[in-house]
Image: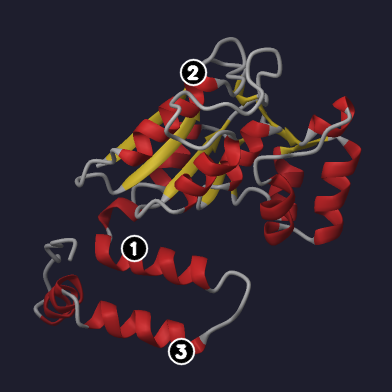
Amino acid sequence: MIETVWLDNPPVNAVNGGIIETLWNAFEQLDSEVRAVVLRGKGERAFSAGADISGFVGGAADGDRPAGIQPVADLIEQAPVPVVAAIHGYCLGGGLEIALACDFRIAHRDAQLGFPEVNLGLLPGGGGTQRAPRLISPGRARWLVMSGERISAATAEAWGLVEFVVDDLEDGIARYVEPLAKQSPNAIREIKELLRDTRDDRSDEREVQAFAACLNSEDGQEGVAAFLEKRAPNWSGK
């Protein structure tokens, strides 16, 4: 199944302790039946317009958890299933940092993205300076962080900050997320780990190891058998 996690803090879903707690709880307690997660913003105005500066300065809802956006963004990035940000309206600052921790981003044409922290004499502190240059050119990432300006969904797609721009998010989720939920959970885990491990340094050896692990897994054996027998595979997730 596909699980939807809502960022819910009206009117623009500013990231506060409640949203941080929601994300921690969702990703620490993922049901074994979940095959993909979609992050969305409640309401019509925003995915998330950034951190709630007045009431949230990096704290977390649970004292046993590390503070700030970066640790929960790391948790999102390490999820064993695909995580997709479905963006509408404003996606700024800490909201964009949460979106960048996802495997990919779908944006409605009305979306506006950016890092406004510099306008407050600050800088992105939830992974923005680290993840953005790995998705788009370093120069464009520098410009976004240093200028504080917003870019449109179309520009974000052209730059590679979002992968898909759509006229309807529900249709976009059906088009780009639902196919992922039909794949082998074991293969998806291996793919995510491989891509994460080799994000900065190429490793053909690591790829061969991941391929062998998939081939020898229950899902790998089932997938090959199903192909040869011309039937749909029945994944065990192992």
Figure quadrant of the C terminus: bottom left
Q: Earlier in the sequence, mark 2 or mark 3?
A: 2
Q: Earlier in the sequence, mark 3 or mark 1?
A: 1
Residue holding disc 2: 8
Position of residue 85 measured from the top left corner of the image (x, y, whole percent): 51, 40
Residue holding disc 1: 188
Q: Is residue 209 left or right of residue 60?
A: left
Residue holding disc 3: 205
Q: Nearer the viewer, residue 10 or 123?
A: 123
Position of residue 147 measured from the top left corner of the image (x, y, whole percent): 90, 39
The correct choice, above or below, for 100 with respect to 191 in the image is above
Type of the residue with mark 2? Asp
The picture quadrant where one finds residue 171 is top left
Figure quadrant of the N terminus: top left
Secondary structure under tag 1 reads helix
The picture quadrant where one finds residue 34 is top left
Tag 3–tag 1 contact (CB < 8 Å): no
Rate crowding at label 1 as few (under 14), some (14 to 19) or many (20 or more) other CA atoms within 10 Å: many
Q: Residue at x 74, y 39 (%)?
A: 124
Check the image and name the residue furthest to the top.
11
The correct choice, above or below, for 199 with respect to 95 in the image is below
Rate crowding at label 3 as few (under 14), some (14 to 19) or many (20 or more) other CA atoms within 10 Å: few
Q: How many numbered discs?
A: 3
